[in-house]
Image: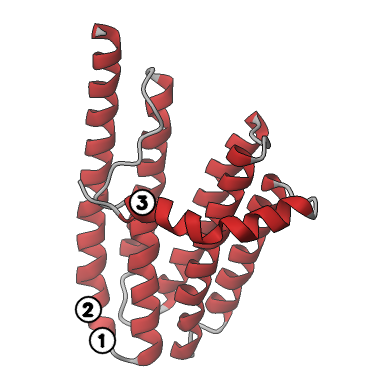
């Protein structure tokens, strides 16, 4: 199924000159990973503390875009400059889940939004990433199947943040949209499990 993740390679091509300069200055992939997570937590805390002011939610889409660039850059540093490591693999998966969860949770503080729905989406997002990682455990690849992968969720919450900040997205719409996200996340989990099992079966047959 089509996912924003599939556009990642084009985005990486735009970032390659900057990544090369970072490498030349001694910046490592793990440093970028940790910096992105730390800044995500800071942005999430800022939005949570000032959630009574709708404009603060504009920080979500602005940071989501910058974070997407940082996430692409740490991967490029690791793959293209020989910085891949087992620690880096752990950091990449763990920090993404931590940062995503932190950035989504402030939406639970908006008036009229059911906090339980936000928490449900966060939990399903964590499970979907776990399902993706489990592909490796059964002998398949790390699964990134959609329709609601990590990049897709970032896009959705970025749009939510911009809509809330601008007043163009009525807060009464957020609950139905969160329900839709939850359903798409369930489908994503199912797809990742099915595709992981199918890939493992093909490898075994081959």
Query: Which residue is under mark 3?
Result: 5
Query: Which residue is under mark 2?
Result: 173
Q: Given contact means CB atoms under 8 Å apart, are the residues at marks 1 and 3 in contact?
A: no
Question: Tell me, what colour scheme is on the image?
Answer: secondary structure
Query: Which residue is under mark 1?
Result: 170
Residues under labels 2 and 3: Cα distance? 26 Å
Q: Position of residue 158 (x, y in %)?
A: 39, 72
Q: Position of residue 160 (x, y in %)?
A: 34, 75
Q: What residue sits 51% from the left and 85% below the top? A: 56
Q: Residue 191: in sight, yes or no? A: yes
Foreground residue, 14 or 48? 14
Residue 99 quadrant:
bottom right
Foreground residue, 113 or 79? 79
Foreground residue, 37 or 47? 37
Q: SS of the residue at dot 3?
A: helix
Q: Given contact means CB atoms under 8 Å apart, are the residues at marks 2 and 3 in contact?
A: no
Q: What residue sits 41% from the left and 46% below the top? A: 126
């Amino acid at each position: 199924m089509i996912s924003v993740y599939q556009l990642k390679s084009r985005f990486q091509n735009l970032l390659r000159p900057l990544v090369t300069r970072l490498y030349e200055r001694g910046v490592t992939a793990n440093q970028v990973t940790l910096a992105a997570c730390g800044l995500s937590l800071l942005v999430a805390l800022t939005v949570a503390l000032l959630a009574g002011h709708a404009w603060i939610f504009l920080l979500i889409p602005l940071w989501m875009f910058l974070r997407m660039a940082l996430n692409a850059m740490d991967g490029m540093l690791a793959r293209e400059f020989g910085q891949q490591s087992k620690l880096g693999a752990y950091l990449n998966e763990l920090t993404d889940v931590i940062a995503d969860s932190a950035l989504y949770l402030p939406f639970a503080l908006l008036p009229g939004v059911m906090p339980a729905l936000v928490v449900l989406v966060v939990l399903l997002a964590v499970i979907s990433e776990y399902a993706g990682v489990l592909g490796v455990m059964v002998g398949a690849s790390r699964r990134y199947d959609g329709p609601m992968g990590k990049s897709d969720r970032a896009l959705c919450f970025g749009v939510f943040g911009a809509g809330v900040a601008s007043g163009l997205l009525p807060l009464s719409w957020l609950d139905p949209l969160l329900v839709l996200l939850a359903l798409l996340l369930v489908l994503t989990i199912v797809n990742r499990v099915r595709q992981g099992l199918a890939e493992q079966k093909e490898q075994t047959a081959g």
